[in-house]
Image: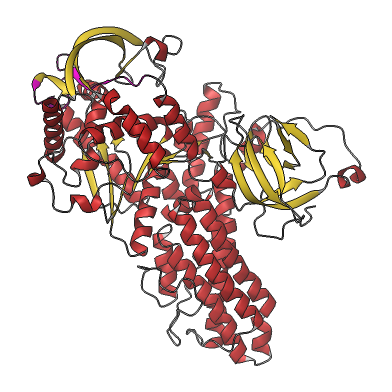
Amino acid sequence: MSTQFYTTTPIYYVNANPHMGHAYTSIVADVMSRWAKMKGQGAWMLTGTDEHGLKVYEAAVARGLSPQAHVDETHLRFKVLLERVGVAYDDFIRTTEPRHKEVVSAVLAMLWERGDIYAADYEGWYSKSAERFWTEKDLKDGKCPDTGGPVEWVTEKNYFFRMAKYGDQLRAWIADHPDFLQPESRKNEVLGYLRKDLGDLCISRPATRLPWGIPLPFDPDYVTYVWFDALLNYLSAIGYHPDPARCAPDFAEKWPAALQLVGKDIVIFHAVYWSTMLFAMGLTPPKTLWVHGWWTVGGIKMSKSLGNVIDPFLLCEAYGADPVRYFLLRELPFGGDGEFSHPAFMTRVNADLANDLGNLAHRALSMTEKWLGGVVPALDAPTEADAALSALAASTAARFRAEMDALGFSRAFDALWELIRAGNKYIDSQEPWRLNREGKMERLAGVMRHCLEICRVASRLLAPVLPNKMAELSAKLALPPATHLDGVDRLDGLSTGAALTLGEPLFPRLLELPAAVQEVLTRVAAEAAEEKKPMSEPVETPAAEAAAFVPDPLPEAIEIDAFGKVALRAGKVVGAERHPKADRLLVLKVDIGEAEPRTIVSGIAAHYSPEDMLGRTIVVVANLKPVKLRGILSQGMLLAAGGAEVKALVTLTADVPPGTVVR
């Protein structure tokens, strides 16, 4: 059984330009690897590039280069991206490396000898764009279901992996290991796929048609199908070999991987192809395969022009890597799709990082420097307010740990920001300026020490997410960079008398779009106008976005008394599950301060899983007449943004008691 926290990204196909999806997956893997190290675990993060296949070969030919020269150049774009977004990987593997090709050949030879690979004639529809065969029933309007590209009928001898042989073993594995596939919606997708005839997997391509790949060791006239080759990177990078005598001594410390991250478009390749390959090799699947969603703009899949608007290189250049990392993890429950816009980015960064955390740190440091000599003050005898703050710190640390372990990033930040906002309110209620004016210096020292301690807790908990800024905050607090979580549940970890550093604010407010972003947006707008594209494809400046958005027409005006009849209440979600008869509905138990929680059925399942909803504070229409929705009585309605399709829930930025009036 593995003892290290081994986490992987998919290896990225070198023929595509690095985009937001690559950055997102890599950041999540980096954060979880750093988090494991903070908890005292051994951790190892792998990423890399997939460099074989027909599209790579054709691109190289078009450029007049050898395939190897082509990938030697193009893989560097991904290394640069990882550097820009602050990803500290432990290994970067390329499928053209000798260490990888040796393992692929050895695995193929072993499976051939065992009879798990066989030769057969094959007829089927072949998609050059997807580099795979499809059955007639798979096609969509006669085209490739993955890419929408054309297909051609191909008849040829090929080699097949007996994938169907391991179908029942995979079904049993999923049933016996509930944490293996996350989130639940993706598990259901895979189970649906497994209910069909699984079939065997074609794992070869004739070298006459595709000369760029790893040759089959038992037939050099064929090369290995790119997916069978690529998936083995997760083993070749950590020293696996079918011959136990040639396996790396620490291989068993890493495998099975603790966490493998993939996008939803490649879940079948990893959940089905990869798992059955592992069974055939006598290995077990990873402990958790986490499938995340996509980032879109205005609900539209990224296009050639719009892709530049959310280019991760541009974002990091304009805003810095740490705010980008925070926004991507904060803005949506992990596993769902996310909507990006520059105004939303600026709003989130200003509200959370500048106004809340940055403001707390700068206020605490500046007042301590001004009135207490710029050193860490001593704690005084705790007051009732101090005790409440300490209790909140303890519960915050526990909630943050639990949510991070479950990849519940947005909920983890919700918990921590409750403490940060409490720190700002504490300053307002304790009025340190008054304490200074009245000469109550001992109490003033205690107040400022508590505020500085909250900053210390934040600098530790957020270190995996904001590594640069939290190292900067640590230095301001006379602390070394965070390497562990010791003391994050207490407000007493600073060294009394240590010299503090005020410096510039951690997170200056974003008052306007950076020039680099504005330049790209102007160009995109000009291109859209030239091509006469509908401007509902959003151009991400606040003014242009407002001009492009066409709101639904307002109904007839009402009197304020009519609005007063709508009872809006704060509700805490204490239970959530999927509707047994409707995939798009969730059945929630919501506490609105009554004797028992209410049952509310809501059509939000496409954007929120049951796990995403638990613990959220939402806004409920409490005096709506109950109505049955697919057989379950719904006793209220949630508020959400969006028209026919829900875009986002209306939530409260701070916890308030269930039943609190919203007006």
Residue 345 placement (x, y as % from top left): 54, 48
- Specify whether residue 613 is painted magenta: no
Which of the two residues, 267 or 243, is positioned nearer the viewer here? 243
Residue 17 placement (x, y as % from top left): 34, 34
Residue drawn at 57 percent across, 52 percent down = 348
Magenta residue span: 197-219
State left or right for residue 295 relative to residue 298.
left
Q: Is residue 197 above or below residue 594?
A: above
Q: Main secondary structure of the magenta part?
A: loop
Q: Is residue 28 above or below residue 197?
A: below
Which of the two residues, 547 or 631, is positioned nearer the viewer here? 631
Residue drawn at 58 percent across, 54 percent down = 511
Quarter of image, res 658: bottom right
- Specify whether residue 204 is painted magenta: yes
For the question of whether residue 13 can be seen, the reply is no
Which of the two residues, 506 or 96, is positioned nearer the viewer here? 96
